[in-house]
Image (spheres, grey):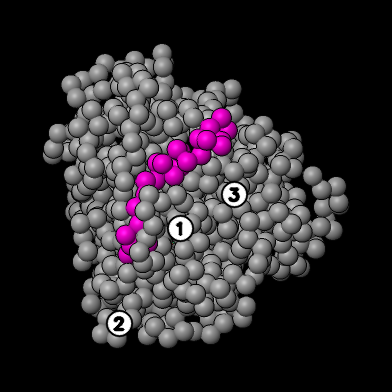
């Protein structure tokens, strides 16, 4: 750790707005040549072959890109491969005894290590078991699992037999699970009895069973025994025990199914503007190439590294950067079951120290918590194995960035602030860590081959320093291909805003606001749709609203995101009750419970504010901006277009009084 006087260093860091890549990092980095940007530009889309070449293909692609039917792009067309083979089999000859997954349970000293040979073995056995249960190519298998090794095993087993997976975050509610299983017509569920949170075994199976109660078709459920003697499960009909299934298939070999590059690898549901979650479809060739390429170029992953992404596999970050990217590159991926403050606030640093972690990829919300807890926690451990730090999920403020750079990276590690989305499959905007200077608070330039722009409402590029809308003007291999069984919504959600189909101009709109500086560095400002970002988790305000209006006694509700010191944003719910409904704490609790039931504890409102009216325009549209201003304690924006301007002041007074 640094032994320089703190005050001096703080002052220096505060002034320095740009940081050069540390020389020790540059010396060994995977990508060091700044010409790569130009190469991609001149040789686009063929330059993307370098991503595909990181993989083993059963047959090579005929065309890099097919754009005949925009915006339904196809990548590496005609190529054939299997993702499980790429993440496992091809490493066995050279690296079979190297560690693929270092799993760290929440209870101290509970760990499991899977070498590539071992992971390959279990994936084969579980793939055989799934087949035995009648799972065929293209059947969607749902996983509703916390951070236990059987989750990546199940994902890779699905990939092996060509059955797309749909992982539902374990923190989501029973209803959320049911909605996703129904939407995907998924007839197989892999789940578990429970897991540990802050030292306590937590039940998970009841939630899964409750969810299945609302699924209209038959489902076969496989249950992993995570809690051992802590909880015994009486299996019901159509419920199977994971261990017995795998035991029955001991030694089984399942040939990886040859998949077309464009065949679906997985579905991932995410929140959008409307109430229904969107089933984002990712493909085998393009997605895997992209996950591998960005892991190589941005996270600087090498086979001998021990790499750690602390996200949950229930989100896209875990799919791309715990499972697919790192395993495709044959590295060691760390996976941690628990929270960063159990048993104490140094847990992450203890893991970095114990496993000699080389890269750490985490979220700003976590970094804000580390900052608040204090530098004494990282200082208890030797973090000198770290070579690179990453962040993802929401904007990071320069203060948090600098704290991370200094107290975790000891000013020796580049920090990559990576902007991307569930839909993009992998990173889109970030510095290449050995190539460009870093500017705290700004993600950086678009990656080579990514044509991102900041435009005004007419789609015209705005100048440096001015806020606008982020757009992407060229396709890329990791992009979503469509929304599951809903091409129309795919076009409406992402392509309608800025495309000009008649001129054959297709522009992807991620629904983020951003600005760019004179060096082309993009600062992402946040969502411009009705999606809020709570601790890096994406939530649709409409989903929360529809849960609230489902409570008897509620007449109307509006949900907005307000600023929150730790979570980034928090849920604020403004609720109009029906006549005669008492506005008391019991009713407030009922509303909160309804949100938790519909979505999960992550969507729990920070505040429920009762009001007799909502601020509306003359055309009847709720003015969410004003509700956000109130939540943030900001000066109110323009109220002159309101039909009922008095109401905002009433609400404001109420919130202040709360
Ligand atoms: C939204 C996507 C990407 C995996 C995790 C979230 C916000 C993401 C950044 C960043 C500023 C960011 C955007 C984006 N976001 N990364 N580095 N700086 N904002 O995936 O749930 O699909 O959410 O997260 O608003 O649109 P997601």
Task: Report if the beta carbon of the residue with label 2 is closer than 8 angstroms to ligand 1.
Answer: no
- Residue 526: image location, x then y, percent: 47, 65
Q: What residue did someone put label 3 on?
A: 301
Q: Is residue 315 visible?
A: no
Identify the element where label 3 is drawn: loop
Q: Which residue does the image show at 33% across and 81% down from the upper left?
A: 505
Q: Are marks 1 and 3 in contact (CB under 8 Å)?
A: no
- Residue 370: image location, x then y, percent: 63, 45
The answer to whether 319 is drawn above or below residue 20 in the figure is above
Question: Is tag 1's residue or tag 3's residue first in the polypeptide sequence?
Answer: 1
Q: Which residue does the image show at 76% across and 54% down from the upper left?
A: 24
Query: Mark on residue 589?
Result: none
Other residues around mark 1 within 10 Å, as few (<14) / some (14–19) / many (≥20): many
Query: Mark on residue 52?
Result: 1
| Residue 95 included in the magenta stretch of the image | yes
Q: What residue did someone put label 2 on?
A: 504
* Magenta-tinted stretch: 74-102
């Amino acid at each position: 750790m640094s032994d320089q006087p703190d005050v001096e260093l703080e002052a220096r860091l505060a002034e320095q707005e740009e940081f050069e890549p540390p020389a020790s990092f540059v010396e060994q980095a995977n990508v060091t040549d700044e010409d790569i940007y130009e190469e991609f530009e001149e040789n686009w889309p063929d330059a993307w072959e370098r991503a595909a070449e990181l993989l083993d293909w059963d047959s090579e692609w005929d065309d890099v890109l097919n754009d005949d039917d925009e915006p339904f792009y196809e990548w590496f067309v005609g190529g054939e491969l299997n993702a499980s083979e790429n993440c496992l089999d091809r490493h066995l000859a050279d690296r079979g005894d190297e560690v693929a997954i270092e799993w760290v349970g929440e209870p101290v000293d509970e760990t499991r290590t899977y070498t590539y040979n071992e992971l390959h073995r279990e994936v084969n056995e579980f793939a055989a078991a799934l087949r035995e249960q009648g799972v065929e190519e293209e059947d969607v298998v749902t996983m509703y699992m916390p951070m236990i090794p059987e989750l990546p095993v199940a994902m890779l087993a699905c990939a092996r037999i060509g059955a797309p997976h749909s992982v539902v975050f374990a923190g989501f509610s029973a209803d959320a699970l049911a909605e996703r299983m129904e939407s995907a017509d998924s007839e197989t569920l892999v789940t578990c009895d429970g897991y540990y949170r802050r030292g306590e075994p937590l039940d998970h199976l009841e939630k899964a069973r409750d969810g299945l109660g609302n699924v209209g078709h038959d489902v076969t459920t496989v249950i992993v025994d995570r809690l051992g003697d802590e909880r015994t499960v009486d299996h019901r009909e159509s419920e199977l025990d994971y261990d017995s299934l795998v035991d029955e298939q001991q030694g089984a070999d399942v040939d990886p199914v040859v998949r077309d590059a464009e065949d679906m690898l997985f579905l991932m549901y995410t929140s959008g503007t409307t109430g229904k979650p969107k089933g984002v479809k990712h493909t085998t060739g393009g997605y895997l190439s992209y996950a591998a390429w960005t892991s190589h170029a941005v996270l600087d992953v090498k086979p001998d590294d021990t790499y750690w992404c602390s996200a949950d596999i229930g989100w896209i970050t875990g799919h791309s950067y715990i499972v697919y990217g790192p395993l495709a590159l044959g590295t060691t991926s760390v996976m941690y079951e628990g929270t960063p403050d159990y048993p104490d606030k140094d847990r992450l640093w203890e893991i970095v120290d114990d496993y000699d972690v080389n890269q750490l990829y985490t979220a700003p919300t976590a970094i804000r918590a580390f900052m608040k807890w204090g530098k004494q926690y990282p200082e208890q451990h030797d973090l000198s194995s770290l070579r690179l730090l990453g962040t993802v999920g929401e904007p990071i403020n320069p203060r948090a960035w600098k704290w991370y750079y200094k107290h975790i990276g000891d000013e020796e590690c580049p920090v990559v602030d990576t902007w991307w989305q569930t839909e993009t499959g992998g990173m889109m905007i970030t510095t290449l860590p050995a190539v460009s200077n870093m500017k705290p608070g700004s993600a950086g330039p678009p990656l080579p081959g990514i044509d991102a722009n900041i435009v005004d409402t007419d789609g015209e590029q705005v100048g440096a320093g001015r806020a606008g809308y982020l757009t992407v003007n060229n396709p890329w291999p990791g992009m979503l291909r469509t929304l599951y069984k809903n091409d129309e919504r795919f076009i409406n959600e992402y392509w309608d805003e800025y495309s000009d189909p008649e001129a054959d101009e297709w522009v992807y709109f991620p629904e983020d606001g951003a600005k760019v500086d004179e060096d082309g560095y993009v600062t992402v400002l946040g969502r411009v749709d009705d999606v809020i970002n709570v601790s890096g988790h994406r939530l649709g305000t409409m989903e929360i609203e529809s849960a609230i209006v489902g409570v008897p006694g509620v007449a109307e509700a509006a949900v907005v995101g307000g600023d929150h010191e730790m979570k980034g944003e928090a849920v604020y719910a403004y609720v109009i009750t029906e006549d005669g409904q008492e506005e008391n704490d019991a009713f407030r609790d009922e509303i909160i419970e309804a949100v938790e039931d519909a979505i999960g504890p992550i969507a729990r409102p920070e505040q429920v504010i009762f009001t007799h009216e909502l601020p509306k325009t003359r055309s009847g549209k709720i003015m969410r901006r004003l509700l956000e201003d109130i939540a943030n304690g900001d000066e109110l924006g323009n109220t002159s277009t309101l039909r009922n301007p008095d109401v905002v002041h009433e609400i404001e007074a109420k919130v202040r009084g709360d």
